[in-house]
C-alpha cells in the first residue's frame, strides 16, 4: 500500500514536493519496520535531505525523520553515520522548544548502538543505563537498551555478562505485551548471547 502511495504521489506531483517526501518517509518507516533496510535507508536519506532542502531543519518533523534515520543506520551497522545523525538530532533538539521522549530516547539508543559497534563498551553501557533511568520509559526502549547491552557484552567476549543480560532481556520480552515481531527479534538477540 505504501509503495502505491509513493508511486501515485510521484506521478501526480511534477517534482520533489513535500508530499513526495512525506510519502517516501512513510514507505521507509514501513520497510524498516519489517526489516527491509536495504530499501528503507535510501528512501529515508532522501526524505531527510528533502526536509532539509525546504528549510525546515529545526522542527519536530525533521527530528522525527532523523530519529528514524539514526535507528536505520544503527541497525545497518553503520556506526559513523548513526553517530553523526544522533549529533544532528542533539543540535536541532537544542533549538526546538519541546522534544518528545521517543525522539530523545531514539537519539540515545542510536548513540549506544554506535558506541557498541565501535567497541566503546563503557559509553554504550552509560547510554543504555541512561535510557532505562528515564522516568516512565516505554518498554520497547527498555528492552532495546538491554539488547544493545547483550550484543555489546557478546562483542566484548564477556560471556557471563552477555548471558546475564540476555536472561533479563528474555524475561522482559516474555513479560511484555509487545507485538509478536518485536518479541521474536528480542528473543533472537537473547539466544545469540547465551
Image (spheres, rainbow, N blue to C red):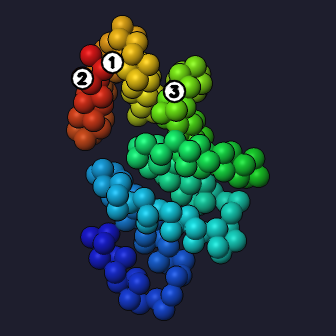
Q: Secondary structure at mark 3?
A: loop
Q: In what quadrant of the picture does the N terminus appear?
A: bottom left
Quarter of the image where one finds residue 54: bottom right
Q: In what quadrant of the picture does the C terminus appear?
A: top left
Q: Circle 3: is it few (<14), some (14-19), or many (20+) Cα within 10 Å?
A: some
Residue at figure coordinates x 48%, y 33% from the top left: 117
Quarter of the image where one finds residue 123: top right
Q: Which mark is residue 119?
A: 3
The residue nearer to you, when weighing 167 against 38, is 38
Residue at figure coordinates x 44%, y 50% from the top left: 72
Marks 2 and 3, the one that precedes in the sequence: 3
Q: Circle 1: is it few (<14), some (14-19), or many (20+) Cα within 10 Å?
A: many
Q: Are marks 2 and 1 in contact (CB under 8 Å)?
A: yes
Marks 2 and 1, the one that precedes in the sequence: 1
- Residue to which mark 2 is pinned: 191
Residue at figure coordinates x 44%, y 64% from the top left: 42
| Left/right of residue 30 with respect to residue 25 in the rendered view | left
Whole-number angstrom distance, CA of label 2 to CA of label 3: 21 Å
The residue nearer to you, when weighing 193 against 60, is 193
Counting the numbered discs, the total is: 3
User: Where is 90 relative to 20, above or below?
Assistant: above
Q: Which mark is residue 136?
A: none
- Residue to which mark 1 is pinned: 166
Amino acid at each position: 500500500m505504501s509503495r502505491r502511495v509513493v508511486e501515485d504521489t510521484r506521478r501526480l506531483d511534477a517534482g520533489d514536493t513535500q508530499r513526495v517526501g512525506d510519502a517516501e518517509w512513510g514507505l521507509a518507516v514501513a520497510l524498516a519496520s519489517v526489516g527491509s533496510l536495504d530499501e528503507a535507508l535510501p528512501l529515508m536519506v532522501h526524505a531527510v535531505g528533502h526536509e532539509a532542502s525546504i528549510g525546515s531543519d529545526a522542527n519536530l518533523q525533521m527530528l522525527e525523520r532523523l530519529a528514524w534515520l539514526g535507528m536505520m543506520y544503527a541497525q545497518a551497522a553503520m556506526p559513523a553515520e548513526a553517530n553523526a545523525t544522533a549529533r544532528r538530532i542533539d543540535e536541532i533538539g537544542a533549538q526546538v522548544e519541546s522534544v518528545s521522549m521517543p525522539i530523545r530516547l531514539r537519539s540515545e539508543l542510536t548513540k549506544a548502538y554506535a558506541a557498541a559497534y565501535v567497541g566503546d563498551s563503557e559509553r554504550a553501557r552509560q547510554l543504555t543505563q541512561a535510557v532505562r533511568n528515564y522516568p516512565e520509559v516505554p518498554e520497547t526502549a527498555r528492552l532495546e537498551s538491554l539488547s544493545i547491552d547483550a550484543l555489546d557484552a557478546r562483542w566484548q567476549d564477556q560471556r557471563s555478562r552477555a548471558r546475564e543480560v540476555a536472561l533479563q532481556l528474555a524475561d522482559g520480552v516474555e513479560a511484555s505485551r509487545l507485538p509478536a515481531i518485536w518479541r521474536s527479534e528480542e528473543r533472537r538477540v537473547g539466544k545469540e548471547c547465551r
